[in-house]
Amino acid sequence: MVRPDPRGRLPAPASKESSLTLERGLALLQAVADAESEAPSISELAAAIGASRAAVYRLLVPLQSRGLVRREGSKVRLGLGVLRLAANVLPQLRMGAQPALRTLAETVGATSHLTVADGTEAQAVAVVEPSWTAYHVAYRVGSRHPVHRGAAGKAIGLPPEGRQWVQSTGELQPGAYGVAAPVRGVPGLRASVGVVALEKLEGDVVGPHVVRAAQEVADALR
């Protein structure tokens, strides 16, 4: 039998309490991650998530036990457990993007890729080459370039309104043509899907295919 408290209020269902605790724990982890240089204090974290210092101490316990945060006196920093989680992100991105990239590469007859922004750089994290062409661009996974150069980088910064895709010529490699579209709707991910070829790509023809592939990748990753 559930008994009311002295004020006559019934306790919240356990599932709701667990959900609130999880939400606060995630908010706390995000607050620690958002600190760019100086590690935040317990008091600062309490203010950031709208909780008491005692609540912050309680929330830190499971995060510390999993290595996601570490305490240095009253300061809190991210732990190495975050790196272990991050190491699993790229393989999942590649797996989720492969079907759409394969379809795009075979349809357009050009090397397709998923590119992710990493600070001021753009990095190719998944690449699929067409199977039926006589020759195609060999694009290496892990290749990096400034995020403001090339179709892949420029597409990441396209605003929601306006053009859905962007193209470039010779910005990263002489004679190479690229068309790319942003991957939208995946929280925390700044990325684009594109194709690159050594023959001119007609943007009006290739663009819609790239936009469709970017949407398929977004759907697969959500």
Image (cartoon, grey):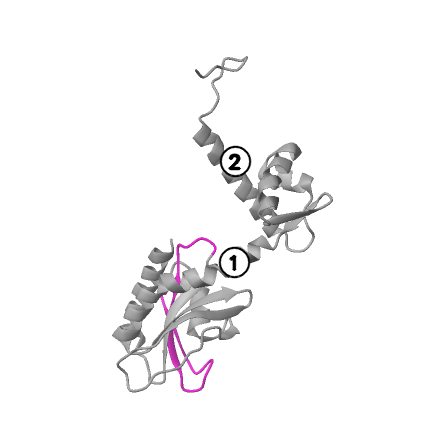
At 36% from the left edge and 68% from the top edge, which residue is drawn?
A: 165
Q: Quadrant of residue 196?
A: bottom left
At 49% from the left edge and 34% from the top edge, which residue is drawn?
A: 20
Q: Which residue is mark 2?
A: 21
Q: Say the numbered circle drawn on residue 86.
A: 1
* x then y, percent, for residue 102: 31, 70
From what the image shows, is residue 70 above or below residue 58? Answer: below
* x then y, percent, for residue 124: 45, 71
Q: Quadrant of residue 169?
A: bottom left
Q: Judge whether residue 44 is colored magenta.
A: no
Crowding near the residue tagged with mark 1, few <14, some 14–19, many ≥20 C-alpha atoms within 10 Å: few
At 49% from the left edge and 70% from the top edge, which residue is drawn?
A: 123
At 44% from the left edge and 65% from the top edge, which residue is drawn?
A: 156
Q: Which portion, as a residue range, is magenta?
A: 163-188
Q: Judge whether residue 171 is colored magenta.
A: yes
Between the C-alphas of marks 2 and 1, the distance is: 23 Å
Q: Quadrant of residue 152?
A: bottom left
Determine the residue located farthest toward the right in the rendered image. 73
* x then y, percent, for residue 59: 59, 38
User: Callout 1: helix, strand or loop?
Assistant: helix
Q: Say the numbered circle drawn on residue 140.
A: none
Question: In the rendered structure, which amino acid carries the disc numbered 2?
Answer: Thr
* x then y, percent, for residue 94: 40, 65
